Image: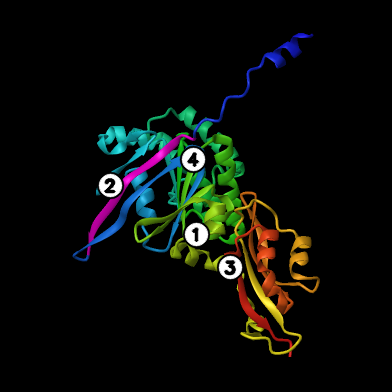
Amino acid sequence: MNARADILLSTPPAAAPREAEVLVEFQQLSRQFQAGGRSVQALQEVEFGIQRGEIFGIIGRSGAGKSTLLRIINRLEQPSSGRVLVGGRDLSGLNEAQLAQARRGIGMIFQHFNLLSSRTVAQNIGLPLKIAGVAAVEIEQRVDELLRLVGLEGKRDVYPARLSGGQKQRVGIARALAHRPDILLCDEATSALDPETTQSILALLRDINRQLNVTVVLITHEMAVIREICDRVAVLEAGRVVELGPVWQVFGAPQAEATRALLASLVHELPPDVQGRIASEPATAQSELLLDVRLDGVSGQDPALGPLVAALGPATRLLHGGVERIQGRAQGRLVLACAPQSRNRLGDLARQLAVPVGNIRILGYLDHA
């Protein structure tokens, strides 16, 4: 037996995967402040953890407490009670110098970029390093690295006024990465951008996460952004976490009313021409039963058309809806038109699609008269 074979045979079995490290942990966190002579509860008993290396989304409607929660991570805001640990360390007990040092491990990018108009792209990126007293030659080297990372090599000496919105945000991302942080906080980082530019910025954040193992925490009011990039998501409503979990799970089977309201913009609603023809009872012999099927992705299976037709009959039509993949799981909505007697085979349909019977709703009857 050759030496290589000996090595292969003697290699010990792979170790069991380690439990994910919690990098940011909120412990019974609350935040109150005074506004207009009254007390406002911005956050209420928030408690969850963000794992190292993940892209974590925080979503909620305006005033839900998203920005407050994000700003507490780097101590731009102070909690009224409870605490937040970053890398197992409570930043609340640090003095000013210690806090400044800790913040270098937490980069932040903003909705409106916050670039200095009187400084070039290179000067904006290098500013945090200059403030920290880093040598000029090291700043130049790091700026060059970051310009390559964000795809702005040719914009080094350009001023912000000559940049597009997407380019400005790339400068903001580069600046936030200047100190090689462990965490990147994104405060509505794509809200001021058009859809195409949003996609490019999200792709950049995903690449940074994967290449540098930077933990990304982003807040947004756009569920499409969460769907596109995040691993897990927390839904805030009136300062409380009302839903928390993997993105596919939260999108596929939302439990909280706030989550369902936020997802409404992504739902394929029935077009008016179909809605106007739905009746509670069949009007003619040609009327079809209309079924609304929700695919939640829990089974991990893709919906197969053959078994669907076998359950409902060969005259079954796909009238409306769509299926997409979120974290490798098929989710969506199918609106099916089928023979009226198919209402007795909903259990068969649920089994064929591997969804609960409760995910299948009878909308009524489609009138062809």
Residue 191, label in figure? 1
**Quadrant for the C terminus in the image:** bottom right
What is the C-alpha distance between the residues marked 2 and 3?
A: 38 Å
Sooner in the amino-acid sequence: mark 2 or mark 1: 2
Circle 2: residue type? Gln
Residue 323 drawn in magenta = no
Sooner in the amino-acid sequence: mark 1 or mark 4: 1
Sooner in the amino-acid sequence: mark 2 or mark 4: 2
Mark 3 is surrounded, within 10 Å at the Cα level, by few (under 14), some (14 to 19) or many (20 or more) other residues, namely: few
Whether pointer 2 and pointer 3 mark residues with C-beta atoms closer than 8 Å, the reply is: no
Look at the picture and state if 86 lies above or below 255.
above
What is the C-alpha distance between the residues marked 3 and 1?
A: 21 Å
The front one of 234 and 71 is 234
Is 352 displayed left or right of 211 in the figure? Answer: right
**Main secondary structure type of the part rendered in magenta:** strand
Query: Can the viewer see residue 165?
Result: no
Circle 3: residue type? Val
Query: What residue is rendered at 54% in x and 38% in y?
Result: 146
Mark 2 is surrounded, within 10 Å at the Cα level, by few (under 14), some (14 to 19) or many (20 or more) other residues, namely: some
Residue 345, horizontal then vertical, whole percent:
69, 69
Element under label 2? loop
Circle 1: residue type? Ser
> Magenta segment range?
20-35
Element under label 3? loop
Residue 43, label in figure? none
Residue marked by disc 3: 267
**Quadrant for the N terminus in the image:** top right
Whether pointer 2 and pointer 4 mark residues with C-beta atoms closer than 8 Å, the reply is: no
Residue 215, label in figure? 4
